[in-house]
Amino acid sequence: MECKETMKHEAEEAVTLTRIRRVREFVEGKDPSYKEVDDLTIRRFLRARDLDIEQASAMFLKYMKWRRDFVPKGSISTSEIPNQIAQNKMFLQGSDKKGCPISVILGYRHVQDSLKEFKRYVVYGLDKICAKIPPEQKFIAIGDLEGWGYSNSDVRGYLGALSILQDYYPERLGKMYIVHAPLIFMTVWKIVYPFIDNKTKKKIVFVENKMLKSTLLEEIDESQLPEIYGGKLPLVPI
């Protein structure tokens, strides 16, 4: 049985490598500079489009154009997002049991401001997180909505962040735990939910307060769990 599973995995990997090569040939035909992109990046776009070469190529080309336009210097600096940084709402700390980074977002600290600056902040945060992801792994996010109210409601911002995550950082999110969600949040959730693709929907988990620590401990060791959830690690601003 184990031999058959190994052979199946090897056959699937051979198909994937062939498709990676075909995507690479296509995109390099559009722009030779894309030779700098590694196979792991192309693999993520292929997985996001169920190994469809044409769709993955289109998604990748859209990503490269966006990256050049939105992040022309290669990275977002803190000087470009002063108001968002001041809100101190995103944290990057520790790792789960697979060695993948953990991000914590405190929703009650988000205040609607410039949409463009917020999008830059999202890219800034995702780049920081992704730089710590081991090959072939994904990150865990904890969206904490304790204290969240209508003053924190920012549908345009939420949809903008969702679009960036799904369109330009495919196969990066492993799981998002939404904790301490108040009832009033569900009004906004009903607006945002239809824009979440099916792959991302499967990664979102609403956690009951009484099950919070036990649920997080399934993926995160207590030594890496934030103190605010009963662990031992203080929050570290991103």
Image (cartoon, rainbow, N blue to C red):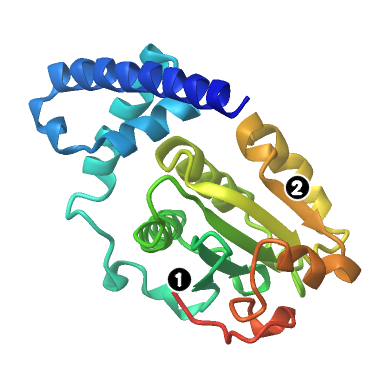
Q: Nearer the viewer, residue 192 or 142?
A: 142
Query: Which of the two labelled residues, at mark 1 and mark 2, occupies the earlier sequence position?
Result: 1
| Residue at the spot 36% in from the left edge and 19% down from the top edge | 14
Residue 102's place in the image compared with 53, above or below, is below
Q: Nearer the viewer, residue 222 or 103?
A: 222
Is disc 2 surrounded by few (<14), some (14 to 19) or many (20+) residues within 10 Å?
few
Q: Position of residue 77 (x, y in %)?
A: 27, 67
Q: Position of residue 91 (x, y in %)?
A: 51, 73
* Residue 84 visible here: yes
Name the kind of residue labelled 1 in the image: Gln
Residue 181's place in the image compared with 78, above or below, is above
| Residue at the spot 43% in from the left edge and 75% down from the top edge | 85
- The residue carrying mark 2 is 189
| Residue at the spot 47% in from the left edge and 28% down from the top edge | 47
Residue 199, picture quadrant = top right
* Residue 197 visible here: no
The secondary structure type at the circle numbered 2 is: helix
What numbered label is drawn on residue 58? none
Q: Is residue 82 left or right of residue 157?
A: left
| Quadrant where the image shows the N terminus | top right
Q: Position of residue 141 (x, y in %)?
A: 59, 60
Q: Nearer the viewer, residue 6 or 174?
A: 6
- The residue carrying mark 1 is 84
Q: CA distance from mark 1 to mark 2?
A: 22 Å
Residue 231, picture quadrant = bottom right
Q: Position of residue 104 (x, y in %)?
A: 59, 69
| Residue at the spot 21% in from the left edge and 42% down from the top edge | 68
The secondary structure type at the circle numbered 1 is: helix
> Disc count in the image?
2
Q: Is residue 95 left or right of residue 238?
A: right
Is disc 1 surrounded by few (<14), some (14 to 19) or many (20+) residues within 10 Å?
many
